[in-house]
Image (spheres, helix red, strand yellow):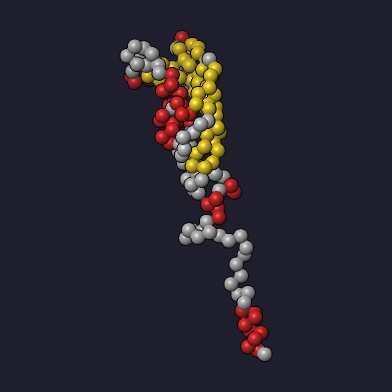
């Protein structure tokens, strides 16, 4: 199953994004049976999001690309029974999995804990430790000293 979903439809994801993001995520779900006939859903999610750099506090693009293989379980106690690379996803009391909640969980797990630009791209590389901006031209503190010495000697 292949579909797109707007980030605005994922309320918990919107809480961690700096602005109401109008981006779309592409979701691909592949259902199957693994070892010992365990059912699973392979969740692929891709999309471009805007996150706030924690160094310079400006927006930065983040390419989300995540793949997980989830197996529905009825309780946390069944999680130990999963084999291989299967991760648990809880079913409700009717034996159903909330697909939107599952997608939202996977998106949140795919976000960096502390998003930051590469140092070369970050606006904070222009800020000194005391908070003042670094000027682009090189400071020459003794440049006027030669003129003063020349005036005294004349």
Expressed as whole percent of the image width and height from the top left, the position of residue 85 reads 48, 21
Compared to residue 38, the image places residue 69 above or below, namely below
The residue lying furthest to the bottom in this view is 154
In the picture, measured across the screen, residue 91 lies left or right of residue 22, that is left
Up-down relation of residue 87 to residue 57 (above or below): above
x%, y% of residue 146? 64, 80
> Residue at 58% of width from left, 72% of height from top?
141
Image quadrant for the C terminus? bottom right
Q: Where is residue 153 in the image (x, y as percent from the top left)?
A: 65, 89
**What is the total number of numbered labels drawn onto the structure image?**
0
One can see residue 44 in this view: no
Give the residue furthest to the top. 37
- Which residue is at a point 48% across and 58% down the rendered structure image? 131
Give residue 139's quadrant in the image: bottom right
Whether 91 is drawn above or below 147: the answer is: above
- Residue 133 shows up from this direction: yes
Q: Position of residue 17 (x, y in %)?
A: 46, 36
The residue nearer to you, when weighing 75 against 105, is 105
With respect to residue 141, does 104 lie above or below?
above
Q: Residue visible at 61% across and 70% down?
A: 140
In front of the other: 55 or 40: 55
The residue shown at (49%, 33%) is: 21
């Amino acid at each position: 199953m292949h579909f797109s979903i707007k980030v605005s439809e994922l309320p918990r994801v919107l809480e961690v994004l700096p602005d109401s993001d109008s981006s779309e995520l592409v979701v691909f779900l592949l259902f199957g049976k693994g070892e010992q006939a365990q059912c699973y859903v392979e969740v692929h999610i891709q999309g471009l999001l805007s996150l706030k750099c924690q160094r310079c506090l400006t927006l930065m693009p983040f390419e989300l690309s995540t793949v997980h293989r989830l197996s529905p379980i009825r309780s946390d106690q069944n999680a130990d029974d999963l084999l291989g690379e299967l991760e648990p996803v809880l079913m409700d009391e009717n034996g159903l999995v909330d697909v939107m909640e599952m997608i939202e969980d996977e998106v949140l797990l795919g976000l960096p804990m502390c998003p930051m630009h590469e140092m070369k791209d970050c606006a904070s590389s222009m800020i000194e430790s005391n908070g003042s901006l670094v000027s682009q031209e090189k400071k020459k503190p003794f440049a006027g000293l030669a003129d003063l010495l020349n005036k005294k000697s004349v």
